[in-house]
Amino acid sequence: MKWIPWILILPVVIIRGFTTLYPIIVTLKNSLFDVKVLSGVNKFVGLANYVNVFKDPKVQTSISFTVEFVVVSMVFHVVLGVILALILNMKFKGRRFLRTIVLIPWAMPAVVIGMAAKWGFNNDYGLVNDFIRRFVPNFQYDWMIHTGSARAAVIAMDLWKDLPFFAILVLSGLQFISGDIYEVDGANGVQSFFRITLPLILKNVITLCIPFTLWRLTAFDLVYAMTSGGPGEDTSLIAYRITTEAFTNLNVGYASTLAVMLFIVMAIFSFINIKFMNKLAD
């Protein structure tokens, strides 16, 4: 009788195992081969693909921007997310309505946001330059053809989309803090935040940083719709580079190598964060 539950869930386990393990195994295998679909090449090269990663300037650019994208985006997510959560936690008329509409950007598909941003940052008819020209007449600047501004625009749109969701999740932690604690403490607003609020929500914020960071590492659709990796390769995130190698260049072996390396980085990062969370729990 004790085997009946296992027998009942066996089909699900088999299907889930196949759809999860099989792609991982095939990707690992392909990373050791030179697989080019168009030329029909499929030969074993060992670790040559992994060595080439460190020699490829396009991949180096993608790694550089991915690190910048993740670090800058997450710093602003934490700082601005906590500030927005504190604002939404205040008692004022229309608070519930504001909490509802603030989630609209998060509910929108990233591709739609990327396409809208591509128009919005256009020099001639974009919303951004139109707003600036109201204060600086004859202002001219094409945001998408300069590396620094293009990267800043991508990070800004990523923040605009996911920051409200981060803030709402932080707000859920603020809801569990009793107002009586602040009355007993007797400190002013700033002191209360650093002495009471921040320590109580710190674990919640760090917990949120784990999935949000992993989502940044695998971000693809926003760059695809907004910049297509340009100018040149300067806004090509590593996930976008993997997709380009696999489906545009049809260089499956090299794309698999990049995917395996990204998987390892994500696994290490997750392990470090989980260990850190366990220490906080103790």
Image (cartoon, helix red, strand yellow):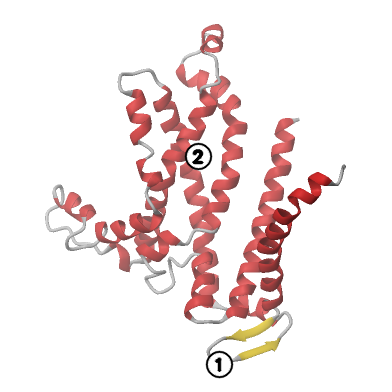
Residue type at mark 1: give it: Ser
At horizontal 51% and vertical 19% (from top left) the residue drawn is 191
- Going from N to C along the chain, the mark reached first, 2 or 1, is 1
Element at label 2: helix
Say which residue label 1 marks.
Answer: 39
Residue type at mark 2: give it: Val
Image coords of residue 259 (percent x, y): 61, 68
At horizontal 33% and vertical 28% (from top left) the residue drawn is 97
Image coords of residue 106 (percent x, y): 40, 45
Q: Residue 267, which numbered label? A: none
Q: Nearer the viewer, residue 266 or 186?
A: 266
Image quarter in which the N terminus is found: top right
Alpha carbon of mark 2 to alpha carbon of mark 1: how far?
47 Å
Q: Nearer the viewer, residue 38 or 181?
A: 38
Residue 55 in sight = no
In the picture, residue 268 is in which quadrant?
A: bottom right
At horizontal 12% and vertical 58% (from top left) the residue drawn is 138
At horizontal 37% and vertical 52% (from top left) the residue drawn is 157
- The answer to whether 150 is drawn above or below residue 77 in the figure is below
Say which residue label 2 marks.
Answer: 78
User: In front: mark 2 or mark 1?
Assistant: 1
Image coords of residue 117 (percent x, y): 30, 57
Element at label 1: loop
- The answer to whether 156 is drawn above or below residue 141 in the figure is above
Q: Is residue 196 left or right of residue 15?
A: left
Q: Is residue 215 left or right of residue 106?
A: right
Q: Nearer the viewer, residue 59 or 195?
A: 59
Image coords of residue 108 (percent x, y): 37, 49
- The answer to whether 114 is drawn above or below residue 281 in the figure is below
CA neighbours of label 1 inside 10 A, class few (<14), some (14 to 19), many (20+): few
